[in-house]
Amino acid sequence: MAELSEALLSVLPSIRVPKAGDRVHKDECAFSFDTPESDGGLYICMNTFLGFGKQYVEKHYQKTGQRVYLHLKRTCKPKEEDTNSSAGDPPRKKPTRLAIGVEGGFDITEEKFEYDEDVKIVIFPEHLDIPRDGLEGLPDMVRDRIASAVEAILTADSASRKQEVQAWDGEVRRISKHAFSLHQLQNDIRIPPCGWKCSKCDMRENLWLNMTDGAILCGRRYFDGSGGNNHAVEHYRETGYPLAVKLGTITPDGADVYSYDEDDMVLDPNLAEHLAHFGIDMLKMQKTDKTMTELEIDMNQRIGEWELIQESGVQLKPLYGPGYTGIRNLGNSCYLNSVMQVLFSIPDFQRKYVDKLEKIFQSAPSDPTQDFSTQVAKLGHGLLSGEYSKPASADGEQQPDQKGVQNGIAPRMFKSLIGKGHPEFSTNRQQDAQEFFLHFINMVERNCRSSENPNEVFRFLVEEKLKCLATEKVKYTQRVDYIMQLPVPMDAALNKDELLEYEEKKRQAEEEKQPLPELVRAKVPFSSCLEAYGAPEQVDDFWSTALQAKSVALKTTRFASFPDYLVIQIKKFTFGLDWVPKKLDVSIEMPEELDISALQGTGLQDGEEEMPDIAPPLVTPDEPKAPMLDESVIIQLVEMGFPMDACRKAVYYTGNSGVEAAMNWVMSHMDDPDFANPLVLPGSSGPGSTIACPDPPSEDSVATIVSMGFSRDQAMKALRATSNSLERAVDWIFSHIDDLDAEAAMDISEGRSAAESISESIPVGPKVRDGPGKYQLFAFISHMGTSTMCGHYVCHIKKDGRWVIYNDQKVCASEKPPKDLGYIYFYQRIPS
């Protein structure tokens, strides 16, 4: 006991009690996907509150000197059934979000297990184990300090739990503005607990109770012919009664409430009172109908898209081992899962992050959970090592209804970090896989400016030719891109007659309120999509330097280089009249092998005459002209210590009316966030209409940006564009990275960067690989659902000569890969 007491006293100063702002990582290791349920448990540093698996806790001690850790080990066991319960199982909560395994979403399985938790304190390097209840005999002050720290760690919300709550913030339905002032008619209507029917038709499902007058009416008709006959919404238009509750979804926990006035699903805190008005006791109601969230899934399944893409109708063989690891859905994170599975099947990403794992971990900062390279390497290792590619089980046996499902990995830290500060990816809403792919590519660019960059496999140069129709002169430019966006010309469908027949049958069914006919999907040839991509596009209001005026031009797009991996996005998504993204229901037979050599750019051809390389005027004839400012007044204000751009704006907005008026303007606008920004003329559209600050950027600011991997010219341009503000310049340069790289590429093509690079230690411009334009299909990501705002993503990847489907935690050999229904395709160059 004396040895333990001495050891605890020696580490006591480093033991902290977590405060409100501390992140307690007690669910997941910072360097691996070990958890308290893993064989070695999880070690939580009692100073930093970082979690470490058995493999990494010793390394953390050696690197930081932190000696004391709280060890958590949970062991799963079957849950004992309550044989004394006579009331039966309580009603299951209805799902309120299109998510799996999170609060408000769909439960995969019921909680059939419980955990024994073993808690102890471990001191390094002696590896002294002290049970939680083994602190007796210590001085009261020491015992109380350690016990309170242990208790605080155990009771604190974990960092992942806090992030999950934040991610759902804003997702919860808002309280209706009518909830506290709803007028209910005193008409003595009482609603029976069952046997409901629409008062205007014979519908007995999808029924809504208007909470003002008690009318029971059917809901909206869905696009596939199911649903109702629109009687509930028609009733609202006639009466203006705003709130309705869906009968059959009422449980003690709530119900689906819709506000026709607010045109959204809402919360009604007074729902029990409003239902009681019609004799409905919420506590006695059981769910009998499907919620709106469940109906969204049903509609997609009826179309057959979900079954086809997930290969649901076929018994698939589960796969396990290195490279066949599933990823848990963290709440609509299937878009992330699919993209990362594909990326870590590419050797360049494996070499960058997985092969250099130890080096990345050794150089990680004090908080590795916030380090991009660390979390990407951790994810890559988790997918490729095979350590987590095991059948899902809790008591050692896989459940029959979970066949093929793995334990997999749950990339909570990665998702939190990659989405940090992003308005979409920081939430748990469904996202567009293509947008996430580009977001991740951008993050890699930011973190690989001066090192090996795996993005080079996707990067290519696009050649754009602009031809002025008035003068026949041309202009060639190049830009960097990572995705080939392929349009879908619906007028090229091969089954137009079938589509017209389907549309006619659909129209008749809607008029007669009958079920819609079986869907006919447009079949568009891939060759037609390629032709549409390469076809000239008309550009109106093009500024022709040959005319020194606006003209009409034709733009033609070609490849100036061919990447190692060609990413093709099928532009299936468009916007409806309500501005909601909708998906074209189209089938495109994508080729196993692809040759796009015909789309190679040619550059300036014999007989073509280039337009003069003259910058467009700062103010074009139909734009406001730059004003004449009284320089003497500006100088007087500057000498008083005010920023040059603020002084220029003061003189402009006071109409050159003198120092006093300008001074009054300055004093009244000093707190404006854009006070020191350059003057932008009203009605102007570009940087040419600003009056920029003439002061040169400081060398310290230039050096700081150059150290990030940018050229001196790029740093100067960013600083000038942001009035020499270093912080704003950094944001500006990353948001304009494609434009800067394209300019650098033009320098390369014109031979200018070679001489410049001699005097600069950092190469200018993007590194672009090139080779033959012949490819073979390597992977594709498919989307199920009506828009990018809902639905589900899976990916298929060709490995070891066979197709494999990755559907979150389920990894199986594919029998019928639906290559015609994909959304994003990945082609690998065929070696010449």
Image (tube, rainbow, N blue to C red):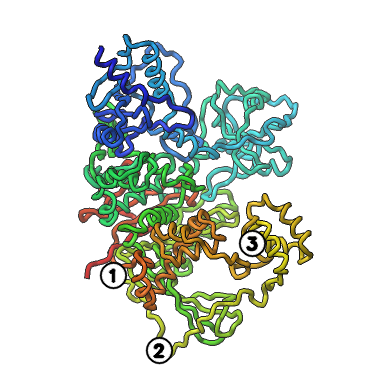
* Amino acid at the residue labelled 2: Asp
* Spot occupied by residue 245 in the image (x, y as percentages of width and height): 61, 33
Q: Are marks 1 and 2 in contact (CB under 8 Å)?
A: no
Closer to the camera in the image, 149 or 284: 149
**Residue that sits furthest to the top in the current view:** 137
The residue under label 2 is 606
* Amino acid at the residue labelled 3: Asp
The residue under label 1 is 774
The answer to whether residue 762 is above or below residue 673 is below
Of callouts 3 and 2, which one flags the residue occurring earlier in the amino acid sequence? 2
**Residue that sits furthest to the bottom in the current view:** 607
The residue under label 3 is 645
Disc number lying in front (1 or 3)? 3
Estimate the spatial distance between the alpha carbons at disc 1 and disc 3, rounded to whole Å.
54 Å
Total labels: the figure holds: 3
The quadrant in which residue 653 appears is bottom right
Q: Along the horizontal axis of the image, is 409 left or right of 424?
A: left
Within-10-Å neighbours for mark 1: few <14, some 14–19, many 20+: some
What kind of element bears circle 3? helix
Estimate the spatial distance between the alpha carbons at disc 1 and disc 2, rounded to whole Å.
27 Å
What kind of element bears circle 1? strand
Whether residue 157 is visible here, answered yes or no, is yes
Disc number lying in front (1 or 2)? 2
